[in-house]
Image (cartoon, helix red, strand yellow):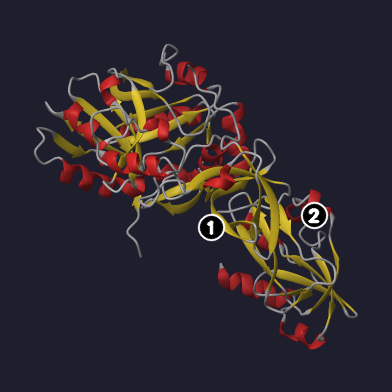
Amino acid sequence: MENLKKTCLYDSHVSLGAQMSPFGGFMMPIQYSDIASEHLAVRKSRGMFDVSHMGEIFIAGPDAEAFVNHVFTNDVTKLEAGHIQYGMMLYPEGGVVDDLLVYRMPEPGTWMLVVNASNIAKDYEWICREASGWNIEASDESEKFGQIALQGPDAEKTVSEALGMDLSDQVFYTFKEVSWNGEYVIASRSGYTGEDGFEFYASPEVTRKIWDVLLAAEVKPCGLGCRDTLRFEAGLPLYGHELSENISPLEAGLGMFVKLDKPDFIGKKAVEELKAAGLKRKLAGIELSDRAIPRAGYPVEADGRQIGEVTTGYHSISTDRSVCLAFVESPYSVLGTGVDIRIRKKVFHGTVCRKRFYEKKYKK
Amino acid sequence: MSKIAEGLLYSESHEWVKVDGLIATIGISDFAQKSMGSIVYVDMPEEDDEVVKDEEFGAVESVKAASDLYAPVSGTVVEKNEALDSEPGLLNQDAYGAWIIRVKMSDLSETESLMDAVAYKEFLDKQA
């Protein structure tokens, strides 16, 4: 039996009656009531997630900026303190080590990398391996931080009324360090739902306090079940599904986060070569004409053969359509192309559509 | 606590069967619908399809997962509950009212291996 970790909010999840399940090495709440009502709470009002399983790796030192830029696909030299960038770490062969957020901390030469729970150890080892020859210090601070994501159109109001924090001047993908009741909190306007929202990083003890204050303010606790349906509708990738060590960010449609105009970074040559050679497969959105649900691993077919595979699929709660993301051979990724998806013994007709099934509502 | 309807037969994979002559009406138990959560899609065979005892004949799907349906008896599908196409949630509302398919059985003796309400209750208690 795998040795599963518990987040600092585990006891609260159990007392709230959450259905708990392993995810990324942690016992995590999948749902408290049901996925659809939690999903809709976030779309229409607000909801909160325990995302303490996410990892926080800090990089500091004289070479920190150059080093982060070397291991990361986006260009952090353009990032101001208090701002956040999304991007990936790549292997030299061009596959993805992990996708992550990079925070440029106010303290000069200090960076926080927020990584996927399942990849914390792998990422940290990768960073330490690559760090030789650079004048930096890397530390995995994941155990010292809890994290809560408060998401939805009413998130800003809730932050002000329940937590007494004024974050109204923050735009999406920015953050600040705040003192909340005398306690250190990194308050970030960010999230993984396609809605406006905030993520709070704090010590386990302070994380529990924030959670309890939000519970008392009747913010709906939401599980990882709806975190997945929400991110999927917004076309946001999940490592292990739309990204992996065998998938290029170009294939996943994330080329805009790979800055080929910066001097060098790990994986750059492989990305350039793939770009020059042309992509054999691309991630596409597919809408089915039936209510049947295409799920990860189901084959996509056309012209009498398999041309791809579903990576994530749902009957979308916000749009009431059966849709999926799938890697398909490039010629079939053109919008409007007809394809079939094999679901158990039957074949259902689908049409290639945009990967974003729900328009993001970030504060600009 | 899950409801168990009297007068029905049950399989270990939580399908129920109501036998009326050669016709078996098949659904899923209240326990099954509760463990699935909100059901959003039911994949049913078509009329005249053959189903084979203990083999998969369709699926019920929640937001998160698909759960296969196994035929408690063998035979030919004579009817499917088309109301479930537009309202799959009927299975959550009334598991014993919302049947899924009706099958003309090819071997009546297959029902002998199924559990009655009392045995199914014991079976559920043992699992708990």
Question: Quick check: A364 above or below B102?
Answer: above
Residue at the limit of the structure toward the top, as seen here: A169
Q: Quadrant of residue A353?
A: top right
Residue at mark 1: A297
Residue at the limit of the structure toward the bottom, as seen here: B109
Neighbours of disc 1 within 10 Å: few (<14), some (14-19), many (20+): some
- In front: B7, or A236? A236
The image position of residue A324, as x and y in percent, is 59, 46
| Gap in angstroms between the C-alphas marked 2 and 1 | 26 Å
Residue located at (69% from left, 42% from top): A321
The image position of residue B122, as x and y in percent, is 64, 75
Residue at mark 2: B84
Question: Quick check: A251 above or below B101?
Answer: above
Mark 1 secondary-structure assignment:
loop
Neighbours of disc 2 within 10 Å: few (<14), some (14-19), many (20+): some
Q: Which chain is indicated by disc 1?
A: A
The image position of residue B94, as x and y in percent, is 78, 56
Type of amino acid under label 2:
Leu
C-beta proximity under 8 Å, tags 2 and 1? no
The image position of residue A223, as x and y in percent, is 51, 42
Q: Quadrant of the N terminus of chain A?
A: bottom left
Q: Is residue A17 visible?
A: no
Q: Which chain is indicated by disc 2?
A: B
Residue located at (38% from left, 40% from top): A276
**Residue A245 in the figure: left or right of residue A324:** left
Question: Quick check: B33 above or below A110?
Answer: below
